[in-house]
Image (cartoon, grey):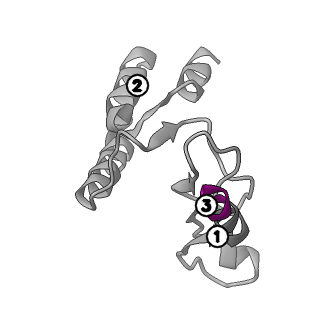
Amino acid sequence: FSALKGFLEIDVALSGATAALEKFAADAGLSLGPALENFSARAKAIEAHGLSSAQIRYDAAFGRPLDYYTGLVFEIAVQGGDRPLVGGGRYDRLLTLLGAKKPIPGVGFSVWLDRIEALRENAK
């Protein structure tokens, strides 16, 4: 259980997440191979689109409370805010849960416009 505990304690800026995951894997005697390469590629893609990876958090314990997500999940929030403004992720098995005969890949998100409006009003 110590390896699982160590993994779930990783909560760092995205800019340091690949290094933190590499250290975790080495300390735990694990090989993350292609999974870590894919993660690193996603982090680089985020930076390539002009987003600061120092302002984005990677939290290994984070998860969306819906069981149909199958990959990357995310939330967007105001720093110090207690609720997300946007949340979503990848859900390749959602449509099979709803009756599709074969998996259909999907990615989506929700935007809480009421929360964004409340922030806008408070900023006035």
Residue 99, position as x, y percentages in the image: 75, 83
In the rendered image, residue 50 lying in the magenta stretch gets the answer no
Q: Amino acid at mark 3?
A: Lys
Q: Residue 105: where, in percent of width, then height?
A: 53, 75
Main SS, magenta residues: helix
Report the side of 58 relative to 86 (left or right). Answer: left
Residue in the image at 48% along x and 39% along y: 58
User: 10 Å neighbourhood of mark 2: few (<14), some, or many (≥20)?
Assistant: some
Mark 1 surroundings: few (<14), some (14-19) or many (≥20) residues within 10 A: few
Distance, label 2 to label 3, CA atoms, is 47 Å
The type of residue carrying mark 1 is Ser
| Residue at mark 2 | 25
SS for dot 1: strand
Residue marked by disc 3: 124
Q: Image height check: is 100 above or below 97?
A: below
Give the mark nearest the N terminus, 3 or 1.
Answer: 1
Up the image or down, 15 lies above or below 121; here it is above
Residue 74 position by quadrant = bottom right
Instruction: Give x and y (percent) for residue 40.
Output: 31, 45
Q: Which mark is residue 110?
A: 1
- Asked if residue 31 can be seen in this view, the reply is no
Residue occupying image coordinates x 42% and y 22%: 24
